[in-house]
Image (tube, grey):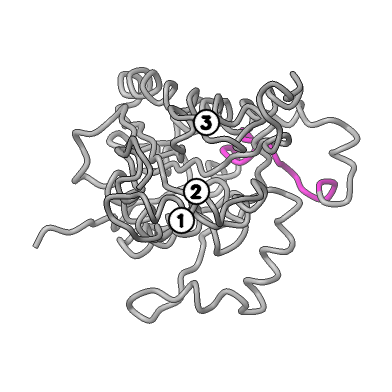
Amino acid sequence: MLSIDLRGKRAFVAGVADDGGFGFAISKALVEAGATVIVGTWPPALGIFRTILARGKLDASLTLSTGEKMTFEEILPLDADFDVEEDVPTELRESKRYRELSHVSIQGAADAIVAKFGERPLDILVHSLANGPEVKNPLLETSRKGYLSAIGTSAYSNISMVQRFGPLLREGGSVVSLSYLAAERVIPGYGGGMSTAKAALESDTKVLAFEAGRKWGVRVNTISAGPYASRAASAIGFIADMIAYAKTNSPLPQELEAREVGDTAAFLSSPLASGITGSTIYVDKGYHVMGKAL
């Protein structure tokens, strides 16, 4: 029987702070397939995440199909706005949620993994990060600062992660990021430069697939997921309307499950997808093919 087998593989999943988003679902799918997972968590959410895990608040979500409970090899602080520790402003570094952390940058997370697990310890890299401080603003009302922040956090951070984690990936490894249909269609209300950020992410996926493929022998793909009511998506303000619209107008009139995105990421990370790179894979019940509302 053909199955996804990731036994002996290790993944780093950036952007996990609760059990309600795609990052958690991807982590769980990877573990279900046999991989071990290290996660990167935004420092302001790190303490809360560790606490609710320790108190068993997420035990139901952590339960695997075998009945065992998923565990993470490491939970590392990660602020994807910063490539190296020197980039972190002094005021932020001295703030309550940062001052006790030895590292918070992308390079810091990479160095911590090498220090514990040795050279080239990874097989899978997942970028599940996005933030647009002005996401509710129409593009015509978006400031330069907000626009560049959206692109920096949501798109450039993927480039930075591949730069710094590429040397840690074994040959045949996989990089997966998360995009959205706003990269190619107009989604009123999804503003602040986020549509541009997603378009950049998809374009960069193609270039990174070529460069990282030639340099390290790894594959780079992105998943364009349909609307889903994660905690991060709630910042948009009308996620329920987006979900209802997609459900009504998709070829498969169902709500998207995070598990479906997780399963796709596991497939893309496996040898079964060894011939797939530089691609945007739609996981949205077919919503992206529709040109007219029903």
Name the quarter where the N terminus is drawn: bottom left
Q: Position of residue 209 (x, y in %)?
A: 34, 24
Would you place residue 168 above or below residue 238 in this image? above
Q: Position of residue 257 (x, y in %)?
A: 40, 61
Q: Dot 3, how many residues are within 10 Å of its Cα: few (below 14), some (14-19), or many (20+)? A: many
Q: Amino acid at mark 3?
A: Asn
Mark 3 → mark 1, Cα distance in angstroms: 18 Å
Q: Amino acid at mark 2?
A: Val
In the image, taking residue 84 as reference, residue 33 lies left or right, namely: left
Query: Contact, CB < 8 Å: mark 3 with mark 2?
Result: no
Q: Position of residue 103 (x, y in %)?
A: 72, 41
Residue under numbered circle 2: 13
Would you place residue 256 above or below residue 287 in this image? below
Q: Earlier in the sequence, mark 3 or mark 2?
A: 2
Numbered tag placed on residue 158 in the rendering? 3
Q: Residue furthest left?
A: 1
Q: Earlier in the sequence, mark 1 or mark 2?
A: 2
Q: Earlier in the sequence, mark 3 or mark 1?
A: 1
Numbered tag placed on residue 37 in the rendering? 1
Mark 3 → mark 2, Cα distance in angstroms: 12 Å
Query: Contact, CB < 8 Å: mark 1 with mark 2?
Result: yes
Mark 1 → mark 2, Cα distance in angstroms: 7 Å
Q: Residue furthest front?
A: 294
Numbered range of the magenta stretch:
98-111
Is 93 covered by the magenta stretch?
no
In the image, taking residue 2 as reference, residue 123 lies left or right, namely: right
